[in-house]
Image: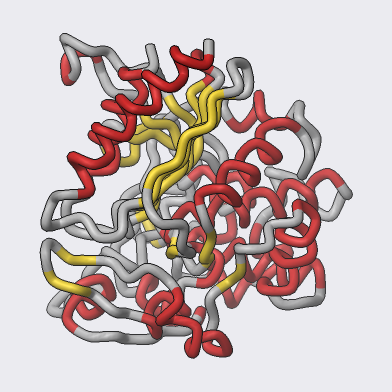
Amino acid sequence: MQQLQSDVTAKLDRIAERFAQRSDVHELQFGITQPSTGLEWSFGEPKQYFIASVTKLYTTAIVLQLRASGDLTFDTPAADILGADTLAGLNTFGGTDRAAGITIGHLLSHTSGIPDYFEGAPKGGESVMARMLRDDVRWSFDDAVGTSRQLPAPFAPGTPGKALYSDTNFQLLGKVIETVTAGSYEAGVDERVIRRLGLDDTYLFTESTLDRADTVSSFLNGRAPLPRPQAMASFGPDGSIVSTTDDGIEFLRAFLTGDLFPVEYIDELTATWRTVFTPLEYGIGIMRFALPRILSPFAPVPAMIGHSGASGSVLYRVPDLDLYLCGTLNQVKNRSLPYRLMATLVNALR
């Protein structure tokens, strides 16, 4: 058994090294844990990195805690918590403002129809993402929702079969957490997740921690360095957490096994999947990477659940193999690259 695991880890090392040598990959880190076999593998120099949109899983965990305590439900209108003025104009579809019908469940599942403040470009303008790629910009919650109000809504809230991945949904969920708990999002994620699980190398990157930017892995846009501390501090509940591969795997294990909220919720979160970016699908607060067989005819990849981030970060579990994967390639341009690495690593373990 020991020799077998040694052979397996050597194979994984070779795969990771091949990716790490690419000129568009920076400070590659990756970790794999398989509890059923005791396999533990890691690659790269351990260092904190921006997990980007994997942060959404932390936000989801807190919302589910609030659900468990009876403070809200999936059917609670977001306007009941945040006020009608906050939601007004965020989904105008068919000439009617439909924002009053947006629920917590819609926000979590990206079925609210609220346009994405980050990648959406107002008429005659450019997206926040385009500006961020050019310069280190900052924005506030009000800026984010204000941008979304300038964009056309693609469908009414809860339209069957429809989903639009929108960072604005999680900006709003961060405000829901702050309103219900009467505290900051930073305090909520620290008390309810980080300290609860003992994630010593995880924290929310904010304006007050800009001086720590040099200790966090930077990322690339293609081959060009992209230092963006102001922007990374602006994402908040949709993408500002810094963590490590070890902490990431421990967090996902806790998320999926009932250490953060009732484990029976997982069946609800994963009952229905809607395509947001092929081959990525969204349930309720959680993502699935499911590569269609037509795209991988020679090496089918089993489905993975967790989340990805635009910085090249991934955090997934492969239920069929009892496998946890966590890591980053620190690359924002080549978005398919982390999935190619994940698929190659997973197939090496089958």
Outermost residue, front side: 3
**Towards the viewer: 322 or 139:** 322
- With respect to residue 73, does 15 lie above or below? above
Whether residue 256 sits left or right of residue 7 in the image: it is right
Residue at (37, 19) in percent of width and height: 7
**Towards the viewer: 299 or 97:** 299
Residue at (20, 43) in percent of width and height: 19
- With respect to residue 106, does 203 lie above or below? below
The answer to whether residue 122 shows anywhere in this view is no
Residue 305 position in % (x across, y down): 49, 31
Residue at (48, 52) in percent of width and height: 54
Whether residue 142 sits left or right of residue 23 in the image: it is right
The answer to whether residue 182 shows anywhere in this view is yes
Residue 147 position in % (x across, y down): 35, 76
- With respect to residue 47, does 289 lie above or below? above
Q: How is the image coloured?
A: secondary structure
The image quadrant where one finds the C terminus is top left
Residue 203 position in % (x across, y down): 61, 69
- With respect to residue 9, does 150 lie above or below? below
Residue at (81, 75) in percent of width and height: 182
How many numbered circles does the render carry? 0
**Towards the viewer: 332 or 30:** 30
